[in-house]
Image (cartoon, rainbow, N blue to C red):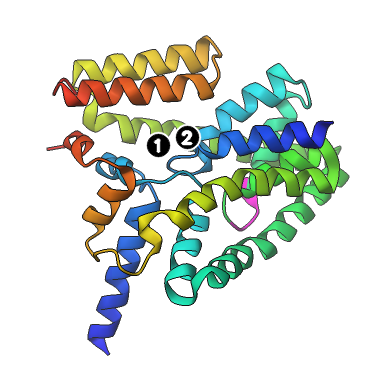
């Protein structure tokens, strides 16, 4: 069933949306257009444009994809599928508890599990 | 009053650092959790101030109205898609969106472009994802592990 497939895929993708939903849009395009053929590349781009033109967070683009693929139920499944696993992770993460230190760096270091990569920072 | 304002601003920046990846500041890449930035911020703040219920309400509150807007706009678009002017506008917005993506990529990549290992990692990711069309579900975990190893060895 297409709804289950859609929901499972978006839930999987949800764990990869580091830095926002835009980071997984190419992967969405690959899966939905190339692998599944649920819509055409042109339609995908048009829906992206419509989502960009609408007010609100970028993640709502996923609801348009869901709507295109499986109607109103599809739009809810896609949006919640992409949001809920990441939201659950945020909810249990150290950043959400009031006891965390107010220093952004230490809280973030704890949530990312490592401060080491901060060596990436430009000089 | 000022102190309170400063405190709340401080907290907000802490929250944003915690759950978002601010563009153009690669230092904060590591500070990110997966998920839509604004949704994560809503959850963190909602939970801090009002507990679990607050997190859920804040999250839904952020998305409910924009969700209706975007669906309404999509319906309007499908209704008027045959008009040349509408398709021209939508194509133009799509092109500008693609351009913004490229600009973001350049902005994020520039600070690390002088490090050979980082360039090699970026090139490998690009080849795999954009040209080889390998799934991000495979590319990303491998790239993350490779990046962490390289960084650990101080090559990055």
Which chain letter matches label 2?
Answer: B
Looking at this view, is B98 or B134 the one in front? B134
Q: CA distance from mark 1 to mark 2?
A: 5 Å
Asked if residue B57 lies left or right of residue B143, the reply is right
Looking at this view, is A117 or B86 the one in front? A117
Q: Position of residue A5 (x, y in %)?
A: 75, 31
Q: Are marks 1 and 2 in contact (CB under 8 Å)?
A: yes
Task: In the rendered structure, find residue B104 and report the number of the disc placed on it.
Answer: 1
Q: Quadrant of the C terminus of chain A?
A: top left
**Residue B44's quadrant in the figure?**
bottom left
Task: In the rendered structure, find residue A7 and report the number of the disc placed on it.
Answer: none
Q: Secondary structure at mark 1?
A: helix
Q: Within 10 Å of the Cα at label 2, are there few (<14), some (14-19), or many (20+) other Cα atoms? A: some
Look at the image and give the residue range highlighted in magenta. Answer: A52-56
Q: Position of residue B144 (x, y in %)?
A: 36, 26
Which chain letter matches label 1?
Answer: B
Residue ID at (77%, 35%): A4
Residue ID at (25%, 66%): A102
**Residue A24's quadrant in the figure?**
top right
**Residue furthest out toward the bottom:** B1
Residue occupied by mark 2? B101
Q: Position of residue A73 (x, y in %)?
A: 82, 47
Residue ID at (77%, 48%): B74
Residue B95 visible in rendering: no
């Amino acid at each position: 069933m297409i709804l289950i497939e859609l929901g499972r895929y978006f839930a999987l993708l949800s764990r990869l949306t580091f830095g926002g939903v835009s980071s997984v849009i190419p992967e969405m395009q690959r899966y939905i257009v190339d692998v599944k053929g649920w819509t055409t590349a042109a339609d995908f781009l048009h829906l992206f444009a419509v989502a960009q033109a609408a007010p609100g967070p970028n993640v709502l683009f996923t609801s348009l994809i869901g709507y295109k693929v499986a109607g109103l139920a599809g739009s809810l499944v896609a949006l919640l599928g992409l949001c809920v696993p990441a939201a659950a992770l945020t909810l249990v993460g150290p950043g959400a508890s009031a006891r965390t230190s107010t220093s952004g760096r230490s809280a973030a270091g704890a949530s990312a599990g490592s401060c080491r990569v901060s060596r990436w920072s430009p000089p | 009053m000022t102190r309170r304002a400063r405190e709340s601003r401080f907290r907000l920046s802490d929250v944003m650092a915690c759950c978002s990846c601010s563009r153009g500041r690669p230092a904060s890449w590591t500070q990110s959790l997966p998920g839509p930035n604004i949704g994560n911020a809503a959850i963190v703040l909602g939970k801090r101030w009002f507990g679990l219920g607050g997190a859920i309400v804040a999250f839904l509150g952020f998305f409910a109205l924009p969700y209706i807007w975007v669906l309404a706009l999509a319906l309007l678009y499908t209704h008027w898609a045959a008009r040349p002017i509408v398709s021209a506008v939508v194509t133009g917005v799509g092109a500008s969106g693609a351009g913004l993506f490229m600009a973001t990529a350049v902005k994020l990549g520039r600070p690390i472009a002088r490090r050979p290992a980082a360039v090699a990692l970026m090139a490998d990711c690009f080849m795999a994802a954009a040209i080889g069309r390998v799934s991000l579900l495979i590319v990303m975990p491998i790239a993350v592990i490779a990046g962490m190893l390289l960084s650990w060895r101080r090559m990055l």
